[in-house]
Amino acid sequence: MRSDVFFLVCLGIGAAVFAAALALGNDYLFFAGYVVAQYVVLATAWNILGGYCGYVNFGSAAFFALGAYATVALHEFYEPLPVPALIVGGGVVSGVVGLGMGYLTLRLRGAFFAIATLALAVVLQTLVVNWDYVGGSRGAYIMRPETIAPLGNYVRYLFLVMLFLAVVAVTAARVIERSRLGYGFATIRDDELAAEASGVPTLRLKLVATAISGALMGMAGAPFPYYIGFLQPSSTFGLDYAVNAIAMPLIGGTTTWVGPLIGALLLGSLQQIATVTISSAVNLLIVGFLLVGFVIVAPNGIVGLQRQYIQHKPVGLVGRRRLGADAPGSAS
Amino acid sequence: MIFSFDLLVNAIVSGILIGGFYAAVTAGVSLSFGILDIVNIAHPAFVILGSYLAYVLNVSLGLDPILASIVMLPAFYALGAGIYQVYYLSFEKRGQESLRGLAFFFGLLFITEVTLVLYFGVDYRYVEARYIGPTWHLGPIDLPLRILVPFLVSLLLIAALELMLTRSFIGRAMMAVAQDQLALRLLAIDPIRVKRIAFGVSIASASLAGAFLIIIQPVEPSVGREYIGRVFAICVLGGMGSLPGTLIAAMMIGIFESLTATFYGPSWAPAVSFGFLLLTLAVRPAGLLGR
């Protein structure tokens, strides 16, 4: 399918989802739907760096929070801007920080990179906690308009925006996956040294990946203050976002755009249901167990299971023993 | 800010004391991450688990927290050995430890933390012991016993681990497994068994570190997160797997944090270790005493 056609199809599906939610008329659907759509964007964004390039980012929450705090800062500094403009703002801030982080850390091997992202998240959180302009550790209140012209409740509008963003993110991931860029990413994931040796500009590609991934996470976070109304550093930088952003692609499958989408829809809705029916702590426990269970039992996620058992296709290199896995220094 | 000599000296001393404790927390990571190349990002969560078990034994049986953690050592060793077995079979054997192994430990971290929240709630818990409370005064220097005692036992722990690594057969086998697994096999030593033992020891050290932690400060389940970056910063700074390096790096971080907290305010302190880590990774990834 051509990318523009794919985009239109996705838009159609998004519009259908929104129409269905409108038809059901339950406002809670919009609240829950917003969170699920937000996770689709976050998981897709994580997967561009984590799934395509094989670099694990534990700092997703920081990029998400940066987007949210960019909104707060703009809100303090300026007249209330329309949400799409805020999304662009959040995307730019997080994208630039992503680029900076990549520049600082991407010369590191896998595990060191992952730890560096975790460290970056704490440094950013400390900065925000000590920055009174955006509320500091007390948090910041953002008043959202109660209603918006054609839709009624403002949350409906936020859901619509986030749905559109999810469509854009998924399309972008699919375009990247099938482009020269995506093949470059895949070479980095499979064997960075060999890629470098055959002339793939690995550092530049990785910088592109961190920037895109960071920007998308920031975009997912930008409307968040309007959604939540009260923004607090400890919850916005919380580990929940980081673990979800990792768990969703890994459960869905990391090598294609479908994986994070399936993972986010499944895990996101499951969590919404569990939060309402059981408790929010239990739903995080479910995420933890699903993550650990899936990486042990189904290393290629749901997409991998489907390929293995329904299409009977081999799952590529994964599952086979990597050459020289025993050699000293090969583990990273 | 009024600069005072007493304040400076006290900040440095308390930094050194806290640094000794940080070294005890990091020792396990130096073993697993530094020597075995297993990125056990969940180590701080096991430390918190150790804190809670020491707390339970202290409250129910009135056992001294450090003694309680020594009683728990075999259980933690078994837990570590079990986790390594799962890790080996699911990731190392298949050669996909980098991405999925990391996610595995991240998931363990999360499960441990949420389970503790569900069971104990998010209230701060603390232990009772004779040495919690009194403070020794040496001239202008204050030595609170609740930090001094963990500091001294930490030094003992580091020394014992270092002796094991350099003198005992199994310890030297652990160092060897990091360098050349094949050579180990040729000597008819099972590298997997060596790694399992080493990982068990690494998790067992978390039991002790957990007891120190709850002696020093009240503990709630998410406290562990602060230690993730700190522990890896110290491990990398100390040169990955060198225990003397770990001790020096831990004291450096302790002193810098304590100075920051004294002169700029405690809310800036977390940024110090993480800033240090980012800087080390960017400038000198081999650490201070790199191998």
Image: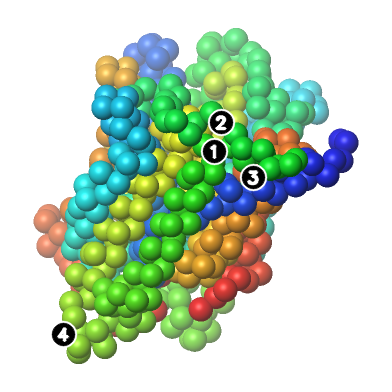
Q: Residue at x 11, y 56 (%)?
A: A309
Horizontal side, residue A161 vs residue B42: left or right: right
Q: CA distance from mark 1 to mark 4?
A: 48 Å
Give the labeled residue for mark 2.
B134
State which chain disc 3 sits on.
B
Q: Position of residue A180 (x, y in %)?
A: 49, 70
Estimate how packed mark 1 is, as few (under 14), some (14 to 19) or many (20 or more) residues with alpha carbons within 10 Å: some
Give the labeled residue for mark 3.
B14
Q: Are marks 1 and 3 on the same chain?
A: yes
Nearest the eye: A86 or A272 = A272
Q: Amino acid at mark 3?
A: Ser
Estimate how packed mark 2 is, as few (under 14), some (14 to 19) or many (20 or more) residues with alpha carbons within 10 Å: few
Q: CA distance from mark 2 to mark 1?
A: 6 Å
Q: Quadrant of the N terminus of chain B?
A: top right
Q: Is residue B225 above or below residue A118?
A: above
Q: Is residue B138 above or below residue A322?
A: above
Q: Amino acid at mark 1?
A: Leu
Disc with the residue nearer the chain's start (3 vs 2)? 3
Disc with the residue nearer the chain's start (1 vs 3)? 3
Disc with the residue nearer the chain's start (3 vs 4)? 3
- Observer-side mark, 1 or 4, equals 1
Q: Are marks 3 and 2 on the same chain?
A: yes
Q: Residue at x 51, y 78 (%)?
A: B291
Mark identifier at residue B188: 4
Q: Say if mark 3 contacts mark 4, CB within 8 Å.
A: no
Q: Are marks 3 and 4 on the same chain?
A: yes
